[in-house]
Image (tube, rainbow, N blue to C red):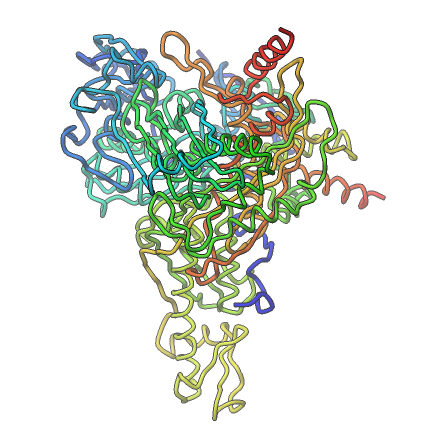
Amino acid sequence: MAKIHVSTTINGEPTEFLCDAGDSMLDALRDTLGLTGSKEGCGTGDCGACSVTLDGRLVCSCLMLAAEADGHKVETIEGMASDHLHPLQQKFLESAALQCGICTPGMLIAAKSLLERNPDPTETEVRFWLAGNLCRCTGYDKIVRAVMETAADMREAAR
Amino acid sequence: MNDQSNKWIGKRTVRPDGADKVTGRAAYAADASMPGMIWGKVLRSPHPHAVIKSIDTSKAEALPGVKAVATAADFVDFPTDTPVPLGIQDMRWMSRNILAKEKVLFHGHPIAAVAAMSEEIAAEACALIEVEYDVLPFAIEIDDAIAKDAPILHDFIQFEGKPSNIAGTLEHTLGDVDAGFAEADVIVERSFTTKPVHQGYIETHACVVSVAPDDRTTIWSSSQGQFMVRAMTTFLTGIPQSKINAIPAEIGGGFGGKTIVYLEPVATILSKKSGRPVKMVMNREEVMRATGPTSGSKSTVKIGAKKDGTIVAGEGTFYLQAGCLPGSPIRGAAGCAFAPYDIKNVHSFGYDVVSNRSKVAAYRAPGAPIGAFAVESVLDEVAEKIGMDPLKLRLKNAAKEGTKAAHGPTFPRIGYVETLEAALNSDHYKTPLTGKFQGRGVASGFWFNAGGESSAQVNITEDGNVVVTTGHPDIGGSRASIANITAELLGIDYDQVSVQIGDTASVGYSNLTGGSRVLFASAMVVTESAAEVIEQLKGRAAKIWGIDPSQVVWEGGEARPMGEHSGNFPSMTLGELAAKANATGGPIGAGSQSNTVGAEGGFATHVCDVEVDVDLGIVRVLRYTCFQDVGRAIHPSYVEGQLQGGMAQGIGWAINEEYIYNKKGQVDNPGFLDYRMPVCSDLPMLDCGIIEIPNPKHPQGVRGVGEVPLVPGPAAVRNAVFDALGIRIDDLPLSPPTVLAAFDANSRQAAE
């Protein structure tokens, strides 16, 4: 079967690629485009390690077909830092909110998505928003604190 | 080294590998590719137990795009009657685990592997391999495996003179338990079961392997030991260690589960046969069916105490599932269970039971949480019966310096008492619970901790900075701790130090990242190397100044003349000495290799508050604190990280996690949806009571930290549920069906 031609925007860059009809967006990112920052922990949408945003909406790229990216904007972990780290990335570093780091890209993408919607989340709101992102190392404590502290810093900076 | 002098030890520095990990740059096992690379896939058994009569791979080999097919016949043969130990593993079993030989022993057992131009073609080819089976009856649970008429997995395993599924036993005896129980005022005896739980690392097993025509082999994989990968690959493929370079990728969690190989030797043979680099990546279902987990168990524990709380005797019998090949962690269960207590009479017995499950792998203090679950649950009841606070009961009997443990050693200075005192005096323990169906539980735990082989190299760069190379994959932040120590020892800035994990061709042999040993052992060899580097630096300065090296002191990152020469020459920084290195004798650097000793055990005490939803059976953790003697917190954030991760895994083990088998002998929940690890909304903040009793046998006072925080968890939660409901549930997990059934049965009993 002929490959599908996809024209999309990834991290702000116009991007074209070919994929099979059954390829997931995660496969396209990792194997075709060399963007290996998004991880496959389960392939079934349960762990969130492959989290990206599609037109600003948080999705598991393992559950999205690569062909669905056509005409849309995808943001991945590789696009999160500009000329400096995003405040969430910086806070994760400073507060040791990662250990092995395999969940970290997805966790950061999910947290950024939360703060874009809700700049002042409660602990409970953070915990439920991140409930789709599994971390086996940290027990989530330092992650939740880092997200809340970043939210406070960003609110302060926006005043 | 006193606290005032510490600039970097104890500081919450930013980890050297951090920026890579928050930007997606860090390369894990599945992130690598090589030119010309093809893909490998594994054919797995559809039966839990069967004799392999024949394997016909001809149709698979004929499929276009297939480049190699491998079966057990392509690997080194290890006859079952000749042990070939490597650490705690045996190559007889490892070879049969990576690819089935005479029999398939569990549903999902690898039988053959294919390398092809794409993963899809490899999978298609696997389906074309024809295997003829003689299907056998199977045993999954311990009781089925040790029943009189149980299907025997291995004819060569004998117990009490007969073929058996009991593959081994272990016994610890201290004093005379019968005499001890005779003195007891109160005796409590209970039986318990725990389910197998998976380590649950988010990164699945993966590797890329390239074998050149002269057998020179490059292995890129994530593991808890690149030297283990090299050694096992050599054993199983016959390629000598000198020809293999095992490169440690960043590892996405291990918890013990990546202390053995599954894919690397298979990819090596596929690469050798195909002449191409081969990449293999397990999916989550393969991980759940065919790797890890830790043992399920059944155990019985009996403890006798006097009215004043003195424990006079303890007896435990622990049956642990090994999976399909021998080797469950009975030492951890039977050895650690009673270790926190000074008990004069102990008898602890472990049985290693094989059944048609995937072979178990290490999981954070292997076996110890199983032993602690039983002992700490019984102690809770002893405390209730004699009307004593459960922490005070433990304090009265706590092991301390000089206590003889049943598993052998006499303890040196340990901090168990301090964990109990900290718990007793904590705000958490002093704050009363007020809600209905709320309860508080406590439990303690012990883990051996390990020393062992480590190597390090400390090199001064030409521009006056420092590169440290060690041989242990860093899972939880050990590079940051080593950088803290190196900066402290050399008196330089943390940012001047870079810490690398060497591959097997560039750093000396270093044993596994496991046994809570990494910082303990690597800090020792780094300390020795840094001391030698300082001697070199003093020598170079002495040469420049034309004085004797004994007249030079290294302080604050500088060489200074001392004694009669004090003040005669301006001090020289690391940068200045590095710039003159070639003129003063060449590159500056030193390495050290050692088999480290003196790790000493670790102790923790947990306090857990729960609330039970008696309509839904859901146990919710409200508050949780871990009090642990960590020796010395070189990097407090990553010490807390270990404690918090251990607490979360203990809560998962207690409340939700379990392997569920169907009637066909297959795992019925091989994914994260149905194998329910704690998610963010399941947990409260996890509090840490860090107690620092420096290990006298370590230059920085380090004591292993990573494993013991899992040990008390399941019992602490279980004891809290008892406090909430007044019902002692002895079977894990305390999942909604179990809790509801216990609550309903209790309510019915009360009504009658």
Query: Relative to the observer, which residue lies in front, B227 or B393?
Result: B393
**Is B547 situated above or below A18?**
below
Dividing the picture into quarters, in which one does residue B53 lie? Answer: top left
**Is B729 situated above or below B348?**
above
Q: Residue furthest right?
A: A159
- Whether residue B31 is visible, yes or no, is no
The quadrant of the image that shows the C terminus of chain B is top right
Q: Position of residue B141 (x, y in %)?
A: 36, 16
User: Would you say B61 lies left or right of A92 here?
Assistant: left
**Is B527 situated above or below B721?**
below
User: Would you say B726 lies left or right of B345 here?
Assistant: right
**Is A96 situated above or below B285?**
below
Residue pictured at 42% horizontal, 75% vertical: B537
- Whether residue B713 is visible, yes or no, is yes
Q: Residue furthest bottom?
A: B564
Query: Relative to the observer, which residue lies in front, B193 or B643?
Result: B193
Q: Position of residue B502 (x, y in %)?
A: 38, 51
Residue pictured at 35% horizontal, 25% vertical: B321
Q: Position of residue B647 (x, y in %)?
A: 55, 36
Query: Relative to the observer, which residue lies in front, B744 or A65?
Result: B744
Report the number of discs.
0
Q: Position of residue B269 (x, y in %)?
A: 24, 31
Dividing the picture into quarters, in which one does residue B641 lie? Answer: top right
